[in-house]
Image (tube, rainbow, N blue to C red):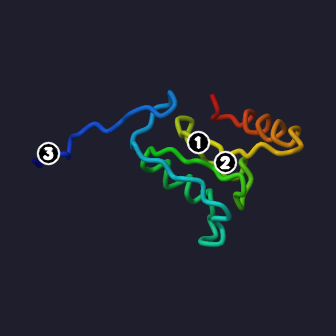
Amino acid sequence: MFIDCEHCDITTTIMGRAVELPIYVFPAAMARLAHPSGEAGIAQACSRFGALQIISKNASMTPEQITANAKPSQVFAWQLYAQVERKKSEDMLARIDKLPHIK
């Protein structure tokens, strides 16, 4: 059965954060190999559509570069592999926690 989807509300929450589109971008390592804008370009597209972006641990850009132009409401998640040296994982989490859009 088809319905009029021109006015459908598809907003939802993912892990308690509001998103406009119930879709997320899976971690894509080394995105700059595909396009010079890399993960920041993916963030820009996600912002346009209100989608969640999961940032790869092996991103070709820093978390600060990726989120530099993020809207305050933009939603990110972070792929994190626990390192043998736990301090490295703890340092990355602390760094991500300092980003201004993280709540």
- Number of the label disc, if any, that sits on residue 68: 2
At x 63%, y 63%, the residue is 38
Distance from Cα at disc 3 to Cα at disc 2: 37 Å
Q: Which residue is mark 1?
A: 76
Residue at the far front: name it: 84
Q: Amino acid at mark 3?
A: Asp
On-image quarter of the C terminus: top right
Q: Which residue is mark 3?
A: 4
Q: Is residue 74 left or right of residue 98?
A: left
Quadrant of the rendered image containing residue 87: top right
Q: Is residue 1 left or right of residue 62?
A: left
Q: Is residue 81 above or below residue 30?
A: above
Q: Amino acid at mark 2?
A: Ala
- Number of the label disc, if any, that sits on residue 98: none
Pick whichever, 69 or 53, lies toward us.
53
Q: Is residue 54 left or right of residue 68?
A: left
Of callouts 2 and 1, which one flags the residue occurring earlier in the amino acid sequence?
A: 2
Q: Secondary structure under badge 3?
A: loop
Q: Secondary structure under badge 1?
A: strand
Q: Residues within 10 Å of mark 2 (few under 14, many from 20)?
A: some
Residue at the far left: name it: 1
